[in-house]
Image: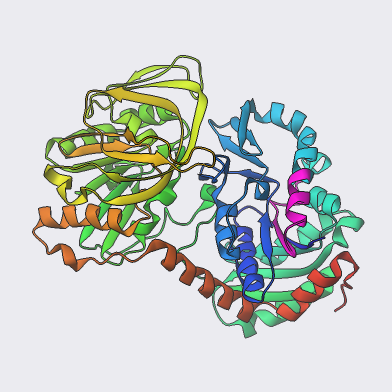
């Protein structure tokens, strides 16, 4: 049976996902078969596995760091918020319905068998499982029905490392307060604490670390510095939206929709020094971009109305009217059409007028399309002629179906297990300088990203060779190795390995 170690945090965005990913990489480098696990994840950035099942991208990141194929067992429950009080509930990769927060909390303990079944399957195939908690284990109003923090740790008998975020201040109060609010049996599970996101001289921090150990009786196993790497984090609290970058050769404006999903689609473009990717949420931030990118969303109708009300729709229409490039993906593609209709309330019941930039109409159904695809861009003309024939791999996650008279943007075959070798299928639409499709991850392939950027550079009169796109998969591998170096140099890995080896029998001695 696999050994385990669990990363819990004093709050959301304490850095649990990245720390877990870093441990996965270190363990992999040291020869262990390691897998990530998070029993319940709330996220709008999701992924489709080879089997056509849906899971959170944070566990996909951790699986990549571990050097293994993402498996839905690593995230058996995924909650995708549709509004402020409700979420689509996905169990073992399949949607089971949309529930209010109150309804889900009434039923969530019913999912414990599914959680344990997924965990046991991983136990049979791996040496170590790195478990990630959610939020804080000291939410006293939620502890009774907990299935993701100490409740899960007890179910699978996992030892715990508790991480606190010093960058937001009050880290000593965070850790001491969390420990004090736990029950004695829960406190005994915490084998070490970690100070995360530290900026400055660690020697100045040492007196505080000694006092922290004295107050809690738990050793501090390391201080992890603040760093930025091109690694997916939890989407709800990502720092990507606030990241400022100096103007580059290409200026891309991504509309930061209230329910934005799968903005990881643009990470390969963000990684390029010559490209400025700005996430904007108001007309004042619009500026004069070279291209506007409309991302996915978990509520197309509500986010379309939001753009209409705050003035961003008018800005996009003006940009397109001047001949500016507009590219939509999934929900963003749906918004570009003539209308969006959701007769059954799959996301938001009703029908609204679209931006009218593409001659398509979208109708939502209850069934969600979940496929992995491999294909290429059609033979294009005009502004995107340079993307003609560019190859890509990606995936579809959508409940709407779009149709119309516009020529297709791409064509592909489905690569989902059991459907490989299916007939070539066209997707998307293009009309002059406006285009879109349903394919997430379309810019991960160097050929597609390079063709897109080259088209913009040609319009601006620049040599397209001024931007060289690197292979995104290789780039991510380098980032994971850098993350592992940071973890090794920051944590007492000898102590971590003892905790993994002995589990909850590991002594907590200072």
Which residue: 8% across, 59% down?
Answer: 461
Residue placed furthest toward the left: 461
Q: In which image quadrant can residue 430 be found?
A: top left
Decide if residue 350 is on the left or right side of residue 173: left
Q: Up-down: is 353 above or below 444?
A: above
Extreme residue in the front direction: 421
Residue 232, percent across and down?
A: 50, 57
- In the rendered image, residue 395, in percent from the top left (x then y), is placed at 44, 43
Q: Is the residue 249 above or below the residue 361 in the image?
A: below
Given residues 55 and 162, the one toward you in this image is 55
Relative to 499, residue 238 above or below = above
Q: Quadrant of residue 204?
A: bottom right
Does any portion of residue 218 appear in the rendered image? Answer: no
- The front one of 41 and 226 is 41
Quarter of the figure with the C terminus: bottom right
Report the front residue among 468 and 347: 468
Residue at 33 percent of width and 63 percent of height: 245
Image coloring type: rainbow
Residue 87 position within the rendered picture, expressed as x and y whole percent measured from the top left: 59, 32
Q: How many marks?
A: 0
Q: Which residues are magenta?
A: 117-139
Q: Is residue 150 visible?
A: yes
Residue at the spot 39% in from the left edge and 25% down from the top edge: 401
Q: Is residue 507 magenta?
A: no
As drawn, the residue found furthest toward the bottom would be 203
Q: Position of residue 111 (x, y in %)?
A: 76, 36
Q: Residue at 57% x, 40% y: name it.
A: 53
Position of 66 with respect to 333 (left or right) is: right
Residue 314 falls left or right of residue 50: left
State the quadrant of the N terminus. bottom right
């Amino acid at each position: 049976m696999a050994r385990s170690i669990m990363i819990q945090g004093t709050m959301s965005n304490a850095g649990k996902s990245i720390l877990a990913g870093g441990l996965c990489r270190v363990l992999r480098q040291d020869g262990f078969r390691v897998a990530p696990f998070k029993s319940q994840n709330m996220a709008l950035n999701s992924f489709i596995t080879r089997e056509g099942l849906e899971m959170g991208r944070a566990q996909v990141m951790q699986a990549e760091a571990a050097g293994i194929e993402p498996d839905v067992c690593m995230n058996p429950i995924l909650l995708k918020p549709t509004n402020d009080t409700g979420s689509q509930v996905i169990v073992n990769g399949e949607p089971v319905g949309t529930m209010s927060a109150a309804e889900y909390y009434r039923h969530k303990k019913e999912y414990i068998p599914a959680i344990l079944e997924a965990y046991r399957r991983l136990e049979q195939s791996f040496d170590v499982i790195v478990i990630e908690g959610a939020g804080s284990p000291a939410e006293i109003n939620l502890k009774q029905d907990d299935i993701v923090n100490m409740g899960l740790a007890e179910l699978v008998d996992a030892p715990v490392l508790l991480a606190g975020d010093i960058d937001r201040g009050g880290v000593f109060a965070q850790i001491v307060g969390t420990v004090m609010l736990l029950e004695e049996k829960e406190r005994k599970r915490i084998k070490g604490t970690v100070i995360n996101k530290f900026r400055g001289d660690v020697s100045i921090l040492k007196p505080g670390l000694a006092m922290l150990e004295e107050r809690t009786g738990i050793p501090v196993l390391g201080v992890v510095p603040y760093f930025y790497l091109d690694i997916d984090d939890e989407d709800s609290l990502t720092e990507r939206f606030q990241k400022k970058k100096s103007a580059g050769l290409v200026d891309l404006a991504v509309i930061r929709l209230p329910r934005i999903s799968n903005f990881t689609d643009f990470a390969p473009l963000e990684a390029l020094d010559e490209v400025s990717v700005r996430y904007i949420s108001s007309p004042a931030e619009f500026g004069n971009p070279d291209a506007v990118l409309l991302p996915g969303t978990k509520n197309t109708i509500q986010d379309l109305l939001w753009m209409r009300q705050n003035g961003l729709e008018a800005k996009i229409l003006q940009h397109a009217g001047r001949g500016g490039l507009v590219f939509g993906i999934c929900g963003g593609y749906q918004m570009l059409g003539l209308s969006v209709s959701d007769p059954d309330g799959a996301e938001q019941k009703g029908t609204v007028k679209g931006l009218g930039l593409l001659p398509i109409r979208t109708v939502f159904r209850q069934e969600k399309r979940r496929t992995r695809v491999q294909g290429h861009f059609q033979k294009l003309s005009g502004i995107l002629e340079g993307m003609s024939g560019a190859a890509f791999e990606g995936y579809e996650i959508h409940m709407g179906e779009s149709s119309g008279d516009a020529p297709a943007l791409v064509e592909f075959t489905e690569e989902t297990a059991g459907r490989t070798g299916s007939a070539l299928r066209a997707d998307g639409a293009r009309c002059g300088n406006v285009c879109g499709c349903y394919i997430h991850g379309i810019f991960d392939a160097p050929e597609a990203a390079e063709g897109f950027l080259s088209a913009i550079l040609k319009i601006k009169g620049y040599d397209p060779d001024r931007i060289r796109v690197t292979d995104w998969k290789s780039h991510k591998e380098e980032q994971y190795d850098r993350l592992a170096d940071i973890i090794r140099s920051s944590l007492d890995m000898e102590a971590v390995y003892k905790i993994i080896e002995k589990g909850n029998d590991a002594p907590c001695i200072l």
